Image: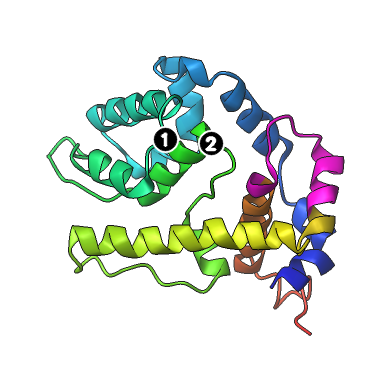
Amino acid sequence: MYHLNNTYSEDILSTIRPDHISEYDWLMDNMKYCREPAYQKRYRTYWRMNAARLCPAYCTAYFDQLHVAQSRKIPLSALARTLYATPTTRTGKQSLQISFASKLLHTADPHLPIYDALVRDFYFWTSPSPRQSLNGRINTLYAFYTFLEQEYQRVLTHNLLQNPIRDFRSRFTPKHFTDEKIIDSLLWAFVALLKHNAIPSGLIEYD
């Protein structure tokens, strides 16, 4: 799969909008304002939180944790449990928002990976069943998150995406994108391209 990212680097990069970079850089520059509504509005838009319809109480707890994470390292498993304690809806429903938790930790430390459905699909990984216990789901997701940390370092150590990372930097000249964040963007864009019929249309060909 990394081979395809290298082969079709230009096609993948062409799907990434410039505001994907500019908004990220703004969020990183202004992180100290994370408790202010203007920052939170742009953060929620960038990380696609609005579609989850999270209630105000959850958002308050979330950005409080982002404030804490800027000065203290928080393990993903601990953050997931902390956020789960606050209902995500006004009716009191709780849900495990592991993707948003990983985005919070990445914002505080941009060398950390991001877990979301497209990155998950790149590695053909299956999310744990909602019928599992909370601890079981968190432990399973944390194990995959640990894999991502180790895998991204392997990618960088062995230069598996060296050219696409170089091309990304040349094309967009990002201010705050770490190599890990560029890997995330490349994988995300690649899977999104596949989901928009890149293979049946002939844009990407397996070999």
Answer with the quarter of the image where residue 10 lies.
bottom right
Q: Which residue is mark 2?
A: 109
43 sits left or right of 193 in the view:
left
Residue 138 pos. (x, y %): 29, 57
Q: In this figure, which colouring scheme has been used for the structure?
A: rainbow
Name the residue rendered at 73%, 29% in the picture.
Answer: 175
Please name the amino acid that badge 1 sits on: Lys
Q: Quadrant of the C terminus?
A: bottom right
Q: Position of residue 56 (x, y in %)?
A: 26, 27
Q: Mark 1 or mark 2, which is nearer to you?
A: 1
- Answer whether residue 168 is magenta in the image: yes
Q: Is-magenta flag for residue 136?
A: no
Q: Residue 81: x, y in percent?
A: 24, 45
Under circle 2, the secondary element is loop
- Is residue 22 among what the camera can see? yes
For residue 156, side relative to residue 27 (left or right): right
Q: Nearer the viewer, residue 194 or 85?
A: 85
Residue in the picture at 37% in, 25% down: 68
Q: Position of residue 199 (x, y in %)?
A: 71, 76
Q: Quadrant of residue 62?
A: top left
Say the numbered circle drawn on residue 73. Answer: 1
Magenta: predominant secondary structure element?
helix
- Could you tell me if the residues under marks 1 and 2 are in contact, i.e. CB atoms within 8 Å? yes
Does label 1 or label 2 sit earlier along the sequence?
Answer: 1
Residue at 81% across / 60% down in the picture? 9
Which range of residues does the magenta coloring cover?
165-181
- Amino acid type for the residue under numbered disc 2: Asp
Indicate which disc residue 203 carries. none
Closer to us: 111 or 6 = 111
Height in image: 79 above or below 124? above
Residue found farthest to the left: 91
